[in-house]
Amino acid sequence: MDLSVTKSDFFELDADNPENGYVLVEGTDVIGSLNQQLAERLKEIDAFEAVIKWENFVHLSGREVISDVFSLAAGTDDKNIGLKNIYYKLAEAMYGKKISSDVSQIAARACIIFNDLLHDRLEYNINTLFKCEILKEILRPETFDASQKGIFNSMLLLSFDKSTEVSPGNVYAKTSAEVEAYPYNALLADAIDITRVAAEFYMSKNEGSKPEPGQVREYKNENKKEYQKFEKDLRDRIKSGSTFVDIESSPICDYAQNKWKANRLSPAILIPESHLWAVARAEYLYLSPSFSIGGNLSRILIDMRYFTSIPLATLTSAKQGPIFRLKHQFLIDIQSSLSKHVSRPGISSIN
């Protein structure tokens, strides 16, 4: 949104003292005039009001958090040392025994805790003070493009920082040779929904007509060789278009307290959205929301039955670092699914 103003509306050449150049026109309220013009433009694109007010609340909440931190330091004999002590304890609260002696690292990790404080204060201020005066209505969209959903999910769920540090949430791509070995060679085979694939095979051979109940199995058996080729070709297409990965799924507390004994991994497939129709739905399969990577919509598919671990030195010595990292809430969702799968009690009964 552009807002154009005319300089001569606010400033004029000082006729009595030309060396002064342009001076403010007497009686001109610059700020008031700009606010009025901005308000008029906002009426044309009223959605901007929410973004502008949110930014103002960010500044307000940031000042309040800083004020709270400084007030704690002000109660000490040496305010400078008091503030440094706060930095150290905040960093220690986040990273425990893995806290670095590097000044920048300590300060940076303290600032990450500031982010949490800012989020809480910002949420409170918005809930209690936010009010729209120009924005009139927000309607349910008739359409919302899938690519937009994917882009937003990428912003919400993924981090593409290039840190090589091994940490929970890191996603590591497997090489083509590794994909041919266990367990990656079994991931795709176990994830395919054979019933759906067989039905697709039937329709491909019968001009798209939907099969009657029981017809698919009979047709599949009658055309076994053709079906096997159809299924193999499908697997090869999915395989060539997917990325096989390991997700570091260890609890963050083990990392923070330096209690890691092994890297706990979830072997997974980064599978294109276009192949999702062929994926089974089962309690042991975790399927992530759709997100965009390089302009392509994909999902993470985890078979929790292959949850495993490797020695700590393996990822540390790997030449290639993570391709991206899962943000904290995304990782927790996966860990929650893993814990439910591991702790299923099962029942003893006579059928």
Image (spheres, helix red, strand yellow):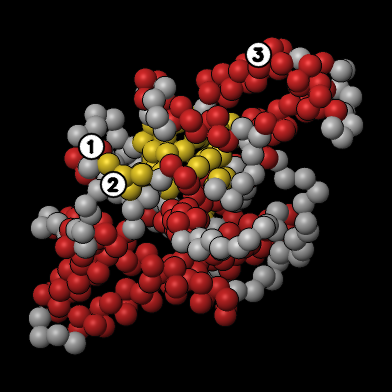
Is residue 77 shown above or below 288? below
Going by the numbered disc 3, the residue's amino acid type is Lys
Seen in the image, is 202 located left or right of residue 284? right
Q: Please tell me which residue is depicted at 73% across the width and 32% down the height of the picture.
A: 196
Is residue 126 shown above or below 225? below
Label 1 or label 3, whichever lies nearer to me, is: 3
Is residue 29 shown above or below 260? below
Going by the numbered disc 2, the residue's amino acid type is Asn
Q: Which residue is mark 3?
A: 229
Instruction: Return the mark for residue 40.
Output: none
The reply to whether dot 2 and dot 1 touch (C-beta < 8 Å) is yes
Alpha carbon separation for disc pair 2 and 1: 9 Å
Taking depth in this image into account, of 12 and 61 the one nearest to the observer is 61
Q: Please tell me which residue is depicted at 69% across the width and 34% down the height of the picture.
A: 277
- Mark 1 and mark 3 lie on one chain; the one further toward the N terminus is 3
Q: Please tell me which residue is depicted at 61% across the width and 32% down the height of the picture.
A: 192
SS under mark 3 = helix
Question: Does residue 129 show up?
Answer: yes
- Rendered-image quadrant of the C terminus: bottom right
Seen in the image, is 53 located left or right of residue 72? right
Q: Quadrant of residue 184?
A: top left
Pointer 2 local density, CA inside 10 Å: few below 14, some 14–19, many at least 20: many
Q: Which residue is mark 2?
A: 263
Q: Which residue is mark 1?
A: 314
- Mark 2 and mark 1 lie on one chain; the one further toward the N terminus is 2
Alpha carbon separation for disc pair 2 and 3: 38 Å
- Mark 2 and mark 3 lie on one chain; the one further toward the N terminus is 3
Pointer 3 local density, CA inside 10 Å: few below 14, some 14–19, many at least 20: few
